[in-house]
C-alpha cells in the first residue's frame, strides 16, 4: 500500500471517530437529558423480541369463555313451590321448603363470553327471600416471559354494569312477602387490562371504521373434540365523539351450531361501562337478543331470516327517530354502505359458515367448512386459505 493511501485511510478513520464524539450528547447537557428520557420506555409499550406463539397458547391466554359458578343460598320459599333461575344456557330449579325454613341449591356453573352481558332471571311462585352467590372461576393461563402476557389476566364480575361486592364475585338478593316474584339482572365478566393495553378483542381499538370487520379466525387443532373448532369474528361500529372506539359486534364460539346463523350468539362488546352507555342497544325481546345498534358514527339493523342473519350498516342521517312499540327504529331510508351476511349455505347440516361482506356492489366471502370424513376444517378468506386437521392432538 502506498504511503499516501495509508495516510488517507488513517485520516478517514480518525474523522469518523471524531464525528461520533461530536454526535454523542454530553452528560448533563439538554441533549443528554433528552436522550435519557427518550430511552425510557413505559412498561408494556416496549418492543420485545419477536417470538412464535402457538395457536393453542393464544387461545388459552384469551379463552372463548370463562366459567362463573352460581349457587342459591338461604332460600325461603313455600312448600312445593319452585324457584327458577336462568343464566345463559344454565337453568337451575330450587324446591322450596317453607317461607320460614331455608334450603340451599347445589352449586352450578355456566360458561360466559368475556365482555358480553347476560340476563340472570329469577322467577318464583311463592318466595320470601333468597340470595344468589356468583363467583368467577378463571381458566388456567400460560404465562409469557415478556410483554403484556407476562402477567396473568385479571377478571372482574359486573352486576347491572356495576362491580360486584368483590372483584371476582358478587351476590344478588331477592325478596318478597312469600308471593310471586320475578326479576332480571345483567351479568358480565370482564378481563381487566392496564389503561394503555388494547383489549385482545379489539373492542377499544379506534383504528376500525364503522363496518370494518375481521376475517373468521379458527382456534387450534389440539382438541379432543374433532368435530369442533373454536372460531372468532367481529365487526366494528366506529368511534365515539371523542375519538374513542365505540365497540364491536362479535361472534366467539367453541364450534359451529344452529344458533351461530341467528342473532342469538351475536353480542356487543365495549372497553368500558362509559363506552357502553354511549351506544344504544335495541333488543328484539326480553331475552336480550340484539335487533339494532345505534352508535355515534353508524346505525346497524340486524335482520334474521331462516339460516342467515344480515347486519346492515347505515349512516346516522339515514335513520329517523320513529320507533314501534318495542323500541325498534322503523324509518330507515336508502341502502346500507356495507352489509355483513352470516349464512349457513348448507341448511341440512352445520358444517359450513359463510360470512360475506358486501360493499359498493362487491362481495367478499369468508368461509369455514368442516369435513366430517377427514375431521378437518377448511378456512378461506376470499383468496387466502387455511387448512387445519382437528384430529391431531
Image (tube, rainbow, N blue to C red):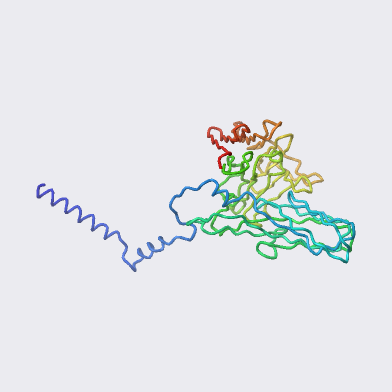
Residue 47 placement, left or right of 287: left
Taking the spot 9% from the left edge, 50% from the top edge, the residue there is: 3
Say which quadrant the C terminus sits in.
Answer: top right
Toward the bottom, the furthest residue is 28
Which residue is nearer to you in this view: 64 or 38? 64
Residue 354: name its quadrant.
top right
Residue 136 placement, left or right of 5: right
Q: Position of residue 368 (x, y in %)?
A: 61, 36
Which residue is nearer to you in this view: 259 or 47? 259
Taking the spot 48% from the left edge, 60% from the top edge, the residue there is: 43
Count of residue discs: 0
Above or below for 60 versus 32: above
Q: Position of residue 358 (x, y in %)?
A: 62, 34
Q: Position of residue 224 (x, y in %)?
A: 61, 43
Above or below for 37 versus 380: below
Q: Position of residue 201 (x, y in %)?
A: 59, 49
Residue 125 placement, left or right of 235: right
Amino acid at each position: 500500500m502506498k504511503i499516501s493511501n495509508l495516510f488517507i485511510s488513517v485520516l478517514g478513520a480518525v474523522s469518523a471517530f471524531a464525528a461520533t464524539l461530536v454526535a454523542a450528547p454530553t452528560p448533563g447537557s439538554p441533549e443528554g437529558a433528552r436522550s435519557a428520557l427518550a430511552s425510557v420506555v413505559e412498561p408494556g409499550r416496549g418492543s420485545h423480541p419477536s417470538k412464535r406463539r402457538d395457536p393453542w397458547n393464544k387461545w388459552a391466554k384469551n379463552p372463548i369463555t370463562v366459567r362463573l359458578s352460581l349457587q342459591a343460598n338461604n332460600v325461603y320459599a313455600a312448600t312445593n313451590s319452585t324457584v327458577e333461575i336462568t343464566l345463559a344456557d344454565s337453568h337451575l330449579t330450587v324446591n322450596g321448603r317453607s317461607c320460614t325454613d331455608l334450603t340451599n341449591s347445589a352449586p352450578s356453573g355456566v360458561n360466559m363470553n368475556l365482555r358480553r352481558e347476560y340476563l340472570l332471571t329469577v322467577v318464583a311462585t311463592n318466595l320470601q327471600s333468597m340470595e344468589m352467590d356468583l363467583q368467577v372461576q378463571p381458566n388456567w393461563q400460560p404465562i409469557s416471559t415478556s410483554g403484556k402476557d407476562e402477567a396473568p389476566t385479571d377478571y372482574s364480575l359486573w352486576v347491572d354494569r356495576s362491580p360486584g361486592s368483590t372483584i371476582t364475585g358478587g351476590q344478588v338478593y331477592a325478596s318478597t312477602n312469600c308471593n310471586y316474584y320475578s326479576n332480571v339482572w345483567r351479568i358480565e365478566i370482564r378481563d381487566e387490562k392496564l389503561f394503555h393495553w388494547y383489549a385482545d378483542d379489539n373492542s377499544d381499538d379506534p383504528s376500525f371504521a364503522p363496518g370494518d370487520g375481521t376475517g373468521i379466525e379458527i382456534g387450534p387443532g389440539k382438541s379432543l373434540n374433532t368435530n369442533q373448532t373454536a372460531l372468532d369474528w367481529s365487526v366494528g361500529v366506529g368511534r365515539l365523539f371523542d375519538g374513542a372506539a365505540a365497540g364491536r359486534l362479535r361472534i366467539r364460539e367453541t364450534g359451529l351450531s344452529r344458533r351461530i346463523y341467528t342473532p342469538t350468539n351475536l353480542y356487543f362488546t365495549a372497553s368500558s361501562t362509559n363506552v357502553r352507555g354511549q351506544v344504544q342497544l335495541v333488543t328484539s325481546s326480553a331475552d336480550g337478543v340484539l335487533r339494532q345498534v345505534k352508535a355515534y358514527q353508524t346505525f346497524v339493523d340486524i335482520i334474521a331470516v331462516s339460516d342467515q342473519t344480515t347486519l346492515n350498516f347505515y349512516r346516522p342521517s339515514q335513520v329517523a327517530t320513529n320507533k314501534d312499540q318495542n323500541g325498534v327504529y322503523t324509518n330507515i331510508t336508502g341502502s346500507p354502505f356495507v352489509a355483513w351476511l352470516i349464512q349457513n349455505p348448507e341448511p341440512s347440516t352445520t358444517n359450513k359458515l359463510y360470512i360475506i361482506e358486501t360493499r359498493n356492489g362487491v362481495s367478499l366471502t369468508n368461509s369455514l367448512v368442516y369435513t366430517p370424513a377427514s375431521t378437518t376444517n377448511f378456512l378461506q378468506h376470499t383468496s387466502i386459505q387455511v387448512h387445519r386437521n382437528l384430529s391431531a392432538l
